[in-house]
Amino acid sequence: MRTRTVLTRLTVLTVFLLVLAACGGGGQAGTSAPAAPAGGQAAAPASGQAAGSTASSNVDANGKFKTPQTIEVMATVRSSELAPPGADWIVAKAVKDQLNIDLKMTWVTQSNEYDRLLQTRAAANDLPDVFLASPTVVSNLAPQGLLADWTPYLKFMPTFVTEREVEKLKPIGTFDGKLLALVTKTPDPYKQSVMIRKDWLDKLGLQVPKTLDEYLAVMKAFTEKDPDGNGQKDTFGWSAAVDTATGRLLRFNPIFGAFGAEFDTNYPWRVDNNKLVYVPTSNERRDALQFIAQMNAAGVIDADWKAQKDEDFRNKWKAGKIGIWFEDWCAGFCSGNHDPFAKANPTGRTIDIDPPVGPGGKSAVSFWTRLNAARFGMSQKAAQAGKGEAIARFMEWLNGPGNTLTTFGEEGKMWKREGDKITVDQANDYRIVRALSAWSVKGSEEELRSRYDQTTSYPNGENIAVWDILQRAQKIAKVDTTDLAVLPPAPSAQAADITRLQAEGEFQFVTGQRPFSQWDAYVQSLKAAGVDAWQQAAEAKAKEAGLIK
Amino acid sequence: MMRSMGFGEKAFDVGVWIILALVTLAVILPLWYLIMISLTPFEIWTRTGGSLFVPPAQWTFEGYKQLLSSARLPRAFGISVFITTVGTALNLIATTLLAYPLSKKEFKLRQPLLLAVLFTTLFSGGLVPTYLVVRQLNLTNTYWSLMLPNLISAFNLLVMKAFFQNLPDEIEEAARIDGASDWQVLWQIVLPLSKPILATVGLFYAVAHWNSFFDAILYISNTEMHPLQVVLRSILSAGNINEYVNPDAAIMPQETLRMAAVVLTTLPLLFVYPLLQKHFTAGTLLGSVKE
């Protein structure tokens, strides 16, 4: 008997604990989940009116709210190796003082987990009030009714709207007539370039290559003629990597550009003779892949490229094993990044050059877009709670009165203006203060100079002026994909399949595992995997946006 | 008197030793290699790709210095230790309290409860429902959110139940004849005999807590409460996006740093293994009962 009573007690206790543990939570999940989309959609139409009518009476002449407001902002920190700002963050204090808004910051220190975190919170109808989201996440969230329409609030953020070109970019963030994502122009300059070892060119008596054929000849010389003079055949003409997440080929962009086959992975299209061409299955792409297969067969690409990550690629050129490579110019030339190269290569000289010109006269370093990669989103929940105006005024503040404070920190202490140049103190404590600067930077020349106007002399004799490189990169040939951003991303059910098929196929073609005689079969498999349906949707949208007739 | 071993037996033994030595080497070498890389300066690493024997004169502790110089690390370390110890203790208590009754055949609700447990091994609510439960219980931004979900792992529960079932009933009966209550039987007879399974299951739980990462960034938005793994990864991920790092900011020697991080995160658990090892040999019961 006693055994039984004790066992019963134990069971009751453990069942209770099991319920607490999420493994037994089927019932709770069933009751909570439907509330999310239903609640979001049902109240959607009411929010705009509510915000518009009650808005302005709540603020004084200086734009400060008469009653305290609270908004939750989710953002990644600018420098993730440092701690996010604490409770005494001067930016939050200024927002409180000037706007009477309590900023509730949710800092994400893991930028690669950001999307997953945001989507989990979205599925639980627990989105932060205002946040940045990738185009793909935006198009997932938009149909669920979880995002608020920004339109009624734009009047509270006039300088933001003008300076970030919001009006012009509106079509990209508009879904069913509602502005669900605030698309802004990018604050970053174009960052890519082709780099070459000038000391190797000089040693082998070669000229800077211009055409693809000249590039290939130089790559061969760099691979075979021991340009570093160490007596070992351990150098390569080119280096590349494979994307760990998707399996895509990385670092071949200028080669694709020379064939007119470079594309934006989010919008892999090109408008050609009033037609929307899906670039990955185009003949130009095939020709470019054939050229890369030729490079691979000639052994001029770094022997490890098929298995290496992007970091490994970077270590390779820093170690002085690579002759020509495609790289973010700041990752290549900004002082902190170039330092390891200068130390490991006492006679090394690196310069940036024009991308190769292909057989049809085409040339491009890579694609680029004038848009900020991430869009600002406001949750429908926040709009319903009447926070829309506070969010809009906060965004305006970031762009106006709070701009330099958020971007650089406290003037005089953390940064100084000397003539027309801003000098920024990079002490760690000051960098922590700038955690939200990704939201405030506008890309003005003053701002860019504070980051990139630096000339550094290295112990190996190199003297690198980053500002000059920046300016050359802005003028260099590239594929502008800004207009394509109105097109829909790959249908979410097929996106992963399309990416995988394409990545696998390209890898097999360039490594010789698959003969090019199978190209048509490959194109068909991609079409069947969902590219056909995607193309139809994209064409419809392209017509609507006037990209094609 | 011991019989001396024949040649065949000796050869067999030597073979076994050689195989075991090779297996041990296969385990130790990668670990040794990563310790060496964590001490190799970037310039040497890039030139040589690292080697198994880096002369001590070249060693650099830069990776460790960079990681440990962050003020966040000691606190994060303490938080991880807290979550691991308290969390594992709670896990063990809860798992024992469910596994023990389920190991008793005379317990009427045994079948339905076991089915309920088994169900969770096949079907899981997934991330979002779990998040909803945690949020609605107001556990977000508390350490409970890292300890209470998955308090009982169905797999560990079944392992423990099977162990309890294999304990001879006679021992418990003998204890009862001596007047022990149910609690006394559980705490004084069954659990002391179950150290091997407590150690094994405890280690499973401890490793899971020590490595907890995504649940921490999901449930805890107060970054001061983040455990070690989250802080270390945020330090490391900065190096991966170095085109966005301010030009003047020092770039860390990545490979060295990454390996140093691996060493720092693995070492504490590595020290726990030998301490628990003696319990893994489940021989305590051999010969204690004759049927």
Image (cartoon, helix red, strand yellow):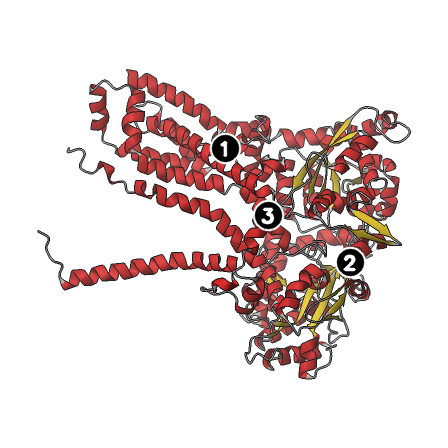
Q: Quadrant of residue B9?
A: bottom left
Asked whether residue A444 appears in the rendered view, the answer is no
Q: Residues within 10 Å of mark 3 (few under 14, many from 20)?
A: few
Whether the residues at callouts 3 and 2 have beta carbons within 8 Å, the answer is no
Quarter where residue A295 is shown: bottom right
Residue farthest toward the left in the current orientation of the protein:
B1
The subunit letter for the residue under badge 1 reads B
Tell me the tag on residue A452.
Answer: 2
Q: Give coordinates of residue A493: x percent, y percent.
A: 61, 47
Q: CA distance from mark 1 to mark 2?
A: 46 Å
- Give neighbour class at mark 2: few <14, some 14-19, many 20+ (Cα, 10 Å): many
Q: Which is more toward the observer, A477 or A76?
A: A76
Hey, what amino acid is under mark 2?
Answer: Tyr
Q: Chain of mark 3?
A: B
Mark linked to residue A141: none
Residue assigned mark 3:
B69
Residue at the right extreme of this rendering: A61
Q: Which residue is identified by label 1?
A: B147
**Residue at the spot x=57%, y=28% of the render?**
B139
Disc 3 and disc 1 on one polypeptide chain: yes
Q: Is residue A203 left or right of residue A408?
A: left
Q: Quadrant of the N terminus of chain A?
A: top left
Q: Amino acid at mark 3?
A: Ser
- Gap in Å between the C-alphas at discs 3 and 1? 29 Å
Marks 1, 2 in one chain: no
- Marks 3 and 2 sit apart, C-alpha to C-alpha, by 28 Å
